Image (cartoon, rainbow, N blue to C red):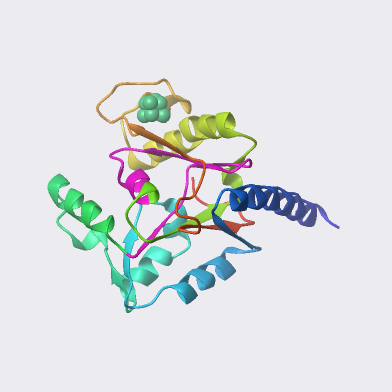
Amino acid sequence: MNAQQAIHEYHRIRIHRAMDAFRRRGFEATYFGNSAEAVEHFFSEVTSHNIIGYGGSDTVSQLGIRRRLAEGDFHFLDRSKFDHSYDGQLDIRRETLSADVFVTSSNAVSIDGALINIDGDGNRIAGLSLGPKRVYLFLGRNKLTENVDRAMIRARNVASPMLAIQLGLDTPCAKTGQCHDCAVPDRICNNFSIIERCNPPGRIRLLFINEDLGL
Ligand code: SF4
């Protein structure tokens, strides 16, 4: 086994530990050796009749899912086609909460079976917790952490600073690469969510991918 194969196997083992924990907590969890398989699995489970909502996610964009939903024969609640004012975007986010399907990712995933998310205005956290009938999360192996504490550290010191840099926001983390628990107008982590059990069981479907994806 070469180094790349060993790295892949190491992550496969960790992902399966996480999947066992999540299944015990009512989540559906599926393993994919690569992202192409995960994307095809998702598209095999949605139809043109489904109303599909999107929770901002670099992983989902990176995998081409957002573009494919926007260009294909889907009832996709595409934010880019709605009024770009704050109120216009709030309207589409509210509509997303009554979608059949919600597709997004997570800022961090604890191997013991918890999803950790930080959100600016809370639309993604709301969609994860209640509303859309089915939720699909695309999860790269880089999102896995050993426990909830480490997942929170990742969310605040990795995912949030990277997102702030990407969006060109004026936050302390965008300048230093770590959280300063700020109170600036551009602060992006206003809402925190830890989901430790899927209720009703099977509503949240976790697509674990043995690749580094997203922020
Ligand atoms: S609280 Fe402020 S500094 Fe910390 S991650 Fe959020 S935006 Fe960045």
- Identify the residue at image location x=14%, y=52%: 88
Vertical relation: 9 (above or below) 81: above
Asked whether 67 falls inside the magenta stretch, the response is no
**144 to the left or right of 96:** right
- Is-magenta flag for residue 103? yes
The number of discs equals: 0
Image side of residue 187 versus residue 6, left or right: left
182 horizontally vs 157: left or right: left
| Magenta-highlighted residues | 100-127
**In the rendered view, does 60 fall on the left or right side of 132?**
right
Which residue ends up furthest to the right in the rendered image? 1
Q: Quadrant of residue 134?
A: bottom left
**Which of the pair 45/72 is nearer the observer?**
45
Q: Position of residue 43 (x, y in %)?
A: 46, 73
- Give the residue drawn at x 31%, y 38%: 120
What quarter of the picture does the N terminus occupy? Answer: bottom right
x, y percent for residue 118: 40, 37
> Quadrant holding ligand 1?
top left
- Residue for point 57% across, 52% down: 140
